[in-house]
Structures are given as structure tokens and as C-alpha cells.
Image (cartoon, rainbow, N blue to C red):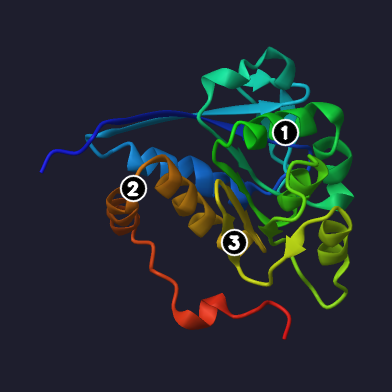
Amino acid sequence: MAHKPIKKNVLMLLAEGFELMETSCFTDVLAWASFLDHVDIKLTTSSTTGTVNTAFGGFNVTTDSTIAQLNLDSFDALAIPGGMEWAGFFENALSKGFIAVVKHFIAQRKPVAAVCVASTYIAKSGEFVGRKATIYHSQTGKHKAKLEGMGVKFIDKPVVESANVITSTGPGTAVEVALALLGQLADANTVNATRQMMRIPTPDKDWYLPQVQ
């Protein structure tokens, strides 16, 4: 059976102190999906200055563009890896330029996928009040409290989808977030084919237990 061609452009925002593992899940899943004959997904990276540092490993990354250079209407979805506060992540990620990008995608009802503490972008946008999301959750509950303080309904699950917005609880969820984003851009058959090609196991029921019990 012939597949409907899927041609999409995805923007990925990288802030200072971002997590490389969370980033690579987006790059690899979308690239592997594009090995399928009917899929063509281009991923463009962007940052405030054009270069950013990873939280771990000392990697300096040059992005495809700066935020100021973007034509947001040319993108079909937004991917946002999380990062570490001590590495300058929130200082950069919650700047006006970053939040303006998130607001645009949420207001346009385009798919938005955020890993771990990147859910803070979603809440800070002001476009997500009263909706369900998750974030990295520990016994201190500080990130949960921050999310709820901005009017978001916290759900203690590894991945939460609220219409077009996908959020998650930590680095280990990133590949499932990337697959969920692929599902919003394509379909379940494409997701399953990509999962099989990459040898990504389907999580068992215990994976979905709350992070804090």
C-alpha cells in the first residue's frame, strides 16, 4: 500500500547548558524516519547567538541559525531539549527570544515537544494555562511547583501529550518524546517502522509508573 508523502520542517531550540542526550534523540529519530521512502523531515537548530555549550562533556555546538534569523512560519513543529540550571540553561532558555518562539508554535497549534525541564518554556509562554504537562520531578518537587505556579496542571507520568504539546520527565524519556513528535508529524505506522529500524524497545507498563512514589 502506498504511503502518503510526509515532508516536514522541524525547528529545534538549543539553550546554553543543554543536554546532548536529549538533543540527539530528536536528531536521530527524525533522521532515521527519513530513511523511509515516504518521509522527508528536515531538522534546523537555532540558538540566541549561534553557538551553545553542552551541560556535560564540554561540547561547543554551532547552530544552523540564530533565533533572530528565523522565519517561524516555515516550520511545522518545535523540539526543545532540556538542560542544567548550573550550566546557564534557564538564564538563556527563559529569555524573551526563546519564549516568543514557543508562544508562536503553541498559538499556531503546531506540534511542540519538550524534554525534562524544557517544560518550563511551555509554562512561561503563558499559552498553556489550565492544560496538562509534566516536568522533571524529584522528592523536592521544585520543578513541579514551578510548573503549577504558572498555571499548568502537573501530571506525574514519563510522557504527557496534551493535544499538540508533548512534555516529559527526564533524559531517559527523550527517545519516546521524539517518537511521539514523529507521530504528530506522520502516523503510527511511520513511528512503528522507525522504532523497528532503530531497535528501540516499546516501554513496558512499569516504565509508566510515577517518578515520585
Label number found at residue 103: 1
Q: Are marks 3 and 2 in contact (CB under 8 Å)?
A: no
Quadrant of residue 201 in the image? Answer: bottom left
**Compared with residue 203, is residue 28 higher up or lower down, i.e. above or below?**
above
Q: Which residue is mark 2?
A: 187
State left or right for residue 100 relative to residue 180. right
Q: Amino acid at mark 1?
A: Lys
10 Å crowding of disc 3: few (<14), some (14-19), many (20+): many
Q: Which residue is mark 3?
A: 160
Decide which of 114, 174 is in the foreground and name it: 114
Tell me which residue sits at (34%, 42%) in the image: 33
> As drawn, which residue projects farthest toward the bottom?
213
Which secondary structure lies at badge 1? Answer: helix
Quadrant of residue 145 in the image? Answer: bottom right
Which secondary structure lies at badge 2? Answer: loop
Tell me which residue sits at (60%, 29%) in the image: 45
Marks 2/1: CA distance?
25 Å
Q: Position of residue 34 (x, y in %)?
A: 33, 36
Q: Position of residue 108 (x, y in %)?
A: 60, 31
Label number found at residue 175: none
Q: Amino acid at mark 2?
A: Asp
Decide which of 3, 163 is in the foreground and name it: 163
Q: Position of residue 154 (x, y in %)?
A: 74, 65
State left or right for residue 52 relative to residue 188. right
Residue 56 showing in the rendered view: no
Q: Amino acid at mark 3?
A: Val
Q: Are marks 1 and 3 in contact (CB under 8 Å)?
A: no
10 Å crowding of disc 2: few (<14), some (14-19), many (20+): some
State left or right for residue 164 relative to residue 199. right
Q: Position of residue 84 (x, y in %)?
A: 80, 52
**Compared with residue 102, is residue 50 higher up or lower down, i.e. above or below?**
above
